[in-house]
Image (spheres, coloured by chain):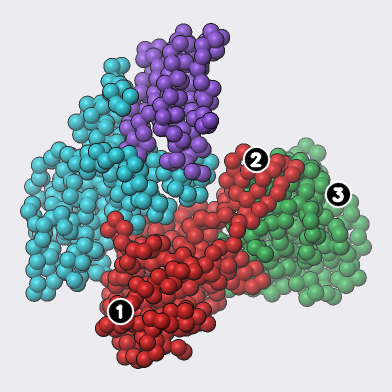
Chain colours: A purple, B green, C red, D cyan
Amino acid sequence: MTAQPKLVGFACRWCSYAGADLAGTSRLEYPASVHLIRVPCSGRVDPTFVIRAFQRGADGVLVAGCHPGDCHYASGNLFARRRFALVKRFLEYLGLEPERFRLEWISAAEGRRFAEVIREMTADLERLGPNRKLREDP
Amino acid sequence: MNPLVPQVATILAIREDTPDVRTFTVRPDGEDFPPYRPGQCAMLSLFGVGEAMISITSTWAPETALEFSVKRAGRVTSALHQAEPGHKVGVRGPYGNSFPVDQWVGHDLLFVGGGIGLAPLRSVINHCLGRRAEFGRVDIVYGARSPRDLCFRQELFESWPKVPGASVQVTVDAADAEWEGPVALVPPFLEQLKPDAAGTFAVTCGPPVMIRYTLQALTRLGFPDDRVFTTLELKMQCGVGKCGRCSIGPKYVCIDGPVFSAAELKSLPAEY
Amino acid sequence: MTMNLLPSERLAEFRECLAAGARLYGPVEVDGIVLFEELGGRPPAIRPGNPANSLKSFLCPQTEAVFDFEGGYTDVALRVPAAPTAQAIFGVRPCDAVALERVSRVLLAEPFADESYRQRREMTTILTMACREAGPHCFCRSVGVSPADGRGSDVVLYPADGHYLLEAVTARGLSVLQSAGAFLDPARDEAARATCQSTPVPLIGAVEREDLAARLEAVALHPHWDELARRCLGCGACTFLCPTCYCFALFDTVRGARGRRSRGWDSCQFKDYSLMAGGHDPLPTKASRIRRRFLHKLSRFPAVQGEYACVGCGRCGGTCPVGLHLAGVLSELEEVLR
Amino acid sequence: MTDRQAALRDIAAGLLGGGQFATFIGFRAGLDPSRPVPHFVRDASGAGALVINPFCGAGLARHVLEALEDGPVGILTRGCDGLGLERLIADGRVARERLHIVAVACRGAVDPARARAILGRIPERAEVDAQAVTLIAGEERRSVPRDSCLLSRCLNCVDPSPRLADSWLDEPLPAGVRDFKAVSHMEQQPPEARYAFWARQFRRCIRCYACRNVCPACSCRSCSLDDPELQERATSLADQFGFQFTRAYHVAGRCVACGECQRACPMSIPLSLLNEKFLKDIRDSFGIADPHRPSAVEPLACYRPDDPESWRGDAR
């Protein structure tokens, strides 16, 4: 049996974190691989958080926020979209596989979508195997 | 043995001296801390936070614990102030030279302290008072920003004044409602007291600015540079003369100091 | 002094013999620059002058663990790292080897000898290649070091046409030559050494050594330091690449209940180098920090150790982004004095 | 060449002589003729030390920050310096009216190390034109292709002249368009090769901070790279990746592509290749034509409601 991949998720408390709750209360099945970190907004996620997660052993990182137009703070996710569009490409440029980082919009009502993203990402990470790049104890 | 690896030690007791000074009683868990002389320092560390060079406030006697009076200033000292009795710290030392007490035998002594600068002086004062018969008068002049910033109150107001031939004069920069004593900065206060320079050794420690003006005051009072001593504090990393941080000209404060005579200081560049 | 000849075509075998009992490092060209790295069978890139990094990388590494700790507030256990293993460094220039000897004066000073440096130094064999041509920034002769200097080396190789003259400087060097006896020819070639001893070191950056320390102290408060400070960027390139700079800092890192206290290079050119917790800083300006660096190397270290803390390797001149070459700065100061 | 130098000296002397300006920043001869050094003229009589030649390689923009503490500054300004000054002005660190910008058109600066390697000795003079570089020492003249001996930052330069100027030493040269060829080439490598490449580069970083200290976009008074909580001092490969990511990301959208970081790096880490990746993606993702030229609003300090989610077309 291979170890389950470690997936770190930064989830906006107004939407994606609630979406994860909904997935749980709806008894939707998704892998237990995700370590969810509640943040006030996807705009709060500093790209160095993502790097830190990879350094400390994450096999993949998800940043999840409200759909564009639905941000509790009006525009946090729109800044995050610009930022992570660049960061995603940059991580790939450094040699990370594209599947290891995702930015997704998941609303509080989308428990199903949350479970689906986690399932997809976990499957991708299982296929890729453990991440050694950027990791401090490879 | 790697000199940078500390002994693990336990905080036995913590005393709150002032709002930002606490005195920690510390004892190594394994071997006893080596004998130390008044004026010497030790590296005190919290694992995961870092190290700071702190003067040893206690006076050595066999099988006694170490005392460090620590003012909350930076990262390490702030974390130390969060510590509780029973917590582990690292300790290594003793480091540096010490006050040339034997040279003072037969003379009067004048100690001039400011703020937490009394911590290294306390070690040498208690050492000298322990050898009371060997010295003449022992006069202690001490000041702090305000009455609540006075360290070592028990000794200042109770034990030291009771010693025969000893005097204690305390001043504050700014009084509060209860304070009835003098209100003055230490250097002018010292000049007003007009201590007799003849045959007296003077020792001072305090913040850099206070040391600078006290040295000038002592000169005006007639103290020759080779009878005035101070103890310096600079940023240190290793404590053992390697890391380069505390150099003043060709000297390292950690191994060649921290005690310097005013004469020695004048031969060094003003980088302290 | 034992001397042997090594035919040039057997140099690779000689290196393999060194690599048998130790990790073997030497200069290699990587992405267009020459660096000391583990050779791993690559041929060394022996060029005039020095690789970008110095031997410091292998004797006082950029960062290394002092000890690991584990536990909580009331229970801590320390663990010191394993002792270093044997290493040999091939193709060192004489100035770099002399620099080790200078650094050792401080780091090995008793009673607090730097244990990790001492262990590494004892496990390191230095095989020096004397210079037949100076590099573009070299000024070793200006600070009393020769292109054929053997101080700090275990074995010195003097290149000649078709062979190298090998000289064992230390007992460890002697045992290297003994173990490589099969490749060596007991013949001698004094001329090979003499040639290197007379290698010209260009005049650029020549330093007038007469009373240098006193002349520098005399200008310690000259406004020209402010001029240098305007140019200086306050980075640490000069000090980190300098083979005689040994300043370090200690720092802790924590991962849950485990942690590590490490030491790592630090630079007196950094603005927080001597800044104290209460805000006091004995070196509050860039000018004061630059002055500290120069005076330490050329006046204050010599006052205690009798030798400069500079070996003329030229790294500061070759790498400073704004051209603050040590020898250049000295000649500017001379100009200012005149 | 000499005309420009004479004009420069006149302008500098005039500015300093007028009493309004405290410093003029340019170059003067170094010990080695191929390495002029940044120079800070403080009074009119010192202006005669100023030089302009193709060996003037260092960027000057960042130096105005400290020089302005003494009063208004005059500065010799090439295209790259001009972009750096624009950055400092846009960041509110420098007031435009406290600068006198002496503009000069630049055809590229010679890398002294490469020039010496080509010539086998230190060149005394050099001539640079659109096609070639001529290195001169004594009687010897050798013409070589530009890409064999210019600083790498100059090879990709599309801004030979500054956009801001108070005086001109010559006619401005037209600006070009960045092609990001090196970035495109890197993007086409497989992930493993890219990772191995960057690991090899980053491993040799000595954390001297020259890249930051020389950067006109890195002028924060308090830098996260100095905060031990945000940037640990350890130098494992993982730490090196973190450090390099942070440096590059913190100038993303603000980098003016002057290439000073790469020029200053004593370990020859190709830092421009990181900065330019961000620039290229900013251009492609947000439709900003020349993202290295400072504009009123930084690309990462704004958004459009309909920004394309272009990454969705990628691998998965």
Q: Residues within 10 Å of mark 1 (few under 14, many from 20)?
A: some
Q: Residues within 10 Å of mark 3 (few under 14, many from 20)?
A: few
Label 1 element class: helix
Q: Nearer the viewer, residue A124 or D188?
A: A124
**Residue C321 appears in the picture as rendered:** no
* Image coordinates for residue D273, horizontal then vertical, percent: 28, 44
Q: Nearer the viewer, residue B181 or B62?
A: B62
Residue D70 is marked as none
Label 3 element class: helix
Instruction: Please tell me which residue is depicted at 86% across the width and 70% down the height of the picture.
Output: B136
Of circles 1 and 3, which is in front? 1
Instruction: Please tell me which residue is depicted at 44% across the width and 68% down the height of the picture.
Output: C19
Residue at the spot of label 1: C8
Q: Is residue C262 above or below residue C198?
A: above
Instruction: Please tell me which residue is depicted at 27% across the width and 20% down the height of the picture.
Output: D308
Residue C257 is marked as 2
**Residue C177 appears in the picture as rendered:** yes
Amino acid type at mark 2 = Ala
* Image coordinates for residue C275, horizontal then vertical, percent: 54, 53
Q: Nearer the viewer, residue C21 or A62?
A: C21
Amino acid type at mark 3 = Gln
- How far apart are the two marked residues, 2 and 1, measured between alpha carbons? 55 Å
Residue at the spot of label 3: B154
- Chain for mark 3? B
| In the image: residue D4, left or right of residue B208 | left
Which mark sits nearer the N-terminus, 2 or 1?
1
Q: Nearer the viewer, residue D242 or C235?
A: D242
